[in-house]
Amino acid sequence: MGSSHGGAGNRFRVTVDDLRRAVDAEVRRNWSDRQWMRWLDAAAVLHGQSFRNVVLIKLQMPDAVWVDGRPGWQRQGRHIARGASGIRIAASARDVDRAAGPVQGHAVATVWDISQTEGSPPPPIGTVAGLRPEDVYAALARVALDAGYRVNRRPLPDEPNGAMTDRRRRRVIVSDNLDGAVAAMRLAHELAHLRMHKLSHDSGCHGLARLEAESVAYTMLARFGVLPAHQMASAAGTIGRNPSVRLVETLGGRVVAAAGRLIGAMDRHLPTAQVRPGKARTAPMCLDAEDRELDRGL
Ligand SMILES: [Zn+2]
């Protein structure tokens, strides 16, 4: 508890509106290609958090790598260090412990980074270390197969993206001259389109759809520590240097939600029990339709 200095740091006065305003101001102030990638990097590490909560966590504790509420840390055999002031995020009210009964809409929740906790040694944190790009590619191909899409490698001389999806025949083709990490990135990009966009055969890959697919693929490969040296589509070049906050937040919400679902679907196909914070999915993921649950925060 202790002293606080206003803003999102004051645990007694912070409202959901305060959090929303803090996110809006942060996005308005810092929007750029570089910041966009920083948020995606943070979303990769803070798997399971909504885009707005990723922005809030980075704002309050830039080095946070694993946040959870008090009960979550207790389940890990850890407790909050004395005097550690929590990080305020938005949670859907049903996720917030309340003795007072059901609460509608969103509520302010307090979480702590692992660095603010003490107790039993934690499992490894950060991005998932020790995976090879080939492991990630194979897991992506299994996610596609679970959803009824075969993945093939063959020459694609006329395809500048190095990959394409044939929705009618339900197959994804990745150029056979791409190396491991780039091939995984192209496959992740195609799965993101399948998950997010109703692209007709010749509507192509450009504009916002391209940026979304690139951003999802970037977040996924960052999560598994296998990002290729890769020039991502420019976010500011796509939606402008001064986009509306609402557009950035919608984009962020869609990208982080889709990447989170795809990462969850990959977990069970990775070679070892690699996956920590966040929930592993147990059922195959549908790629042809997006769930309604887009962004849990705010
Ligand atoms: Zn594309």
Image (cartoon, rainbow, N blue to C red):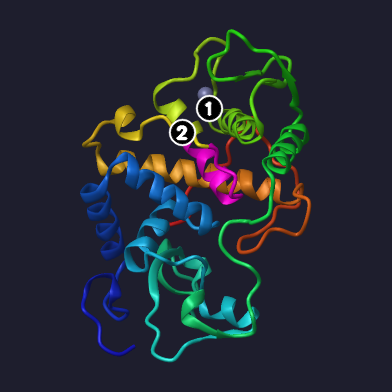
Residue 41 position, x and y percent, is 46, 51
State whether residue 77 is above or below residue 265.
Answer: below
Q: Is 116 left or right of 159, judged from the image as shown? A: left
Q: Does dot 1 land on a helix, a strand or a loop?
A: loop
10 Å crowding of disc 2: few (<14), some (14-19), many (20+): many
Query: Image quadrant of residue 47?
Result: bottom right
Q: Is 32 left or right of 119, judged from the image as shown? A: left
Q: Is residue 252 visible?
A: yes
Give the magenta-colored segment's residue range: 215-228
Q: Earlier in the sequence, mark 1 or mark 2?
A: 1
Q: Does dot 2 land on a helix, a strand or a loop?
A: helix
Instruction: Please identify the quadrant where the N terminus is shown.
Output: bottom left
Q: Are marks 1 and 2 in contact (CB under 8 Å)?
A: yes
Query: Image quadrant of residue 228?
Result: top right
Residue at 65 percent of width and 33 percent of height: 287
Label placed on residue 212: 2
Q: Is residue 166 magenta?
A: no
Q: Is 75 left or right of 152, judged from the image as shown? A: left
Residue at 52 percent of width and 57 percent of height: 45
SS majority, magenta: helix
Residue 89 position, x and y percent, is 40, 66
Amino acid carrying label 1: it is His
Q: Is residue 218 magenta?
A: yes
Residue 55 position, x and y percent, is 36, 56
Is ligand 1 less than 8 Å from the beta carbon at label 2? no
Label placed on residue 44: none
Residue 38 position, x and y percent, is 39, 50
Number of disc labels: 2
Amino acid carrying label 2: it is Glu
State whether residue 214 is above or below residue 249.
Answer: above
Name the residue tied to disc 1.
Answer: 197
